[in-house]
Amino acid sequence: MALTEAEKKKIEEEEAYRRQVRTNLTSQMEMRTTKSRITAALLAIFLGDIGIHKFYLGRPIQGVIYLFFCWTGIPGIIGFFEGIIYLLMSDASFGMKYS
């Protein structure tokens, strides 16, 4: 069964519309990122021992764990390295993980 020119054109227009919708959704998702990678990195480096960066990133349970163990100094060391990791991440990967 062969398609007429009008049917082919309609199918192409629908495909173009779907591509445009996907592109718009992707750009809206990228713009929705409200967490700053630099802010998270600075919080992790300077206040990582009390877990402030975890609260900022919306991970309160991990923040409480950091706060509970802050007297050991281990969360400070981990926070410092997490800050470095945040600085080395791309904005896209940071946005996908934390937004």
Image (tube, rainbow, N blue to C red):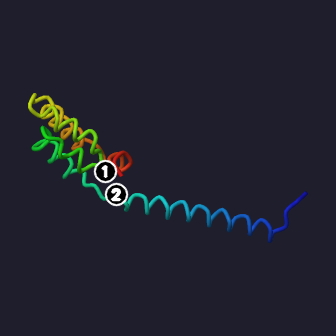
Q: Position of residue 35 (x, y in %)?
A: 28, 55
Which secondary structure, mark 2? Answer: loop
The residue shown at (23%, 51%) is 56
Figure check: 67 above or below 19: above
- Disc on res. 33: 2
Q: Are marks 1 and 2 in contact (CB under 8 Å)?
A: yes
Q: Is residue 6 above or below residue 99?
A: below
Circle 2 packing at 10 Å, graded few (<14), some (14-19), many (20+), is: some
**Picture coordinates of residue 48, whole percent (x, y):** 15, 40
Q: Is 95 situated left or right of 19 in this image?
A: left
Indicate the secondary structure of the residue bearing disc 1: helix
Measure how far apart labels 1 and 2 are at the Cα level: 9 Å
* Residue corresponding to mark 1: 91
Specify the quadrant of the image occupied by residue 27: bottom left
Q: As shown in the figure, which amino acid type bears the numbered disc 1?
A: Asp
| Identity of the residue drawn at 19% across and 46% down | 41
Image point (28%, 41%), residue name: 61
Q: Nearer the viewer, residue 55 or 26?
A: 55
Position of 3 with respect to 54 (left or right) is: right
* Lower sequence index among marks 1 and 2: 2
Quarter in which the N terminus is drawn: bottom right
Identify the residue at horizontal 73%, vertical 64% (top origin).
Answer: 11
Neighbour tally class for label 1: few under 14, some 14-19, many 20 plus, Cα within 10 Å? some
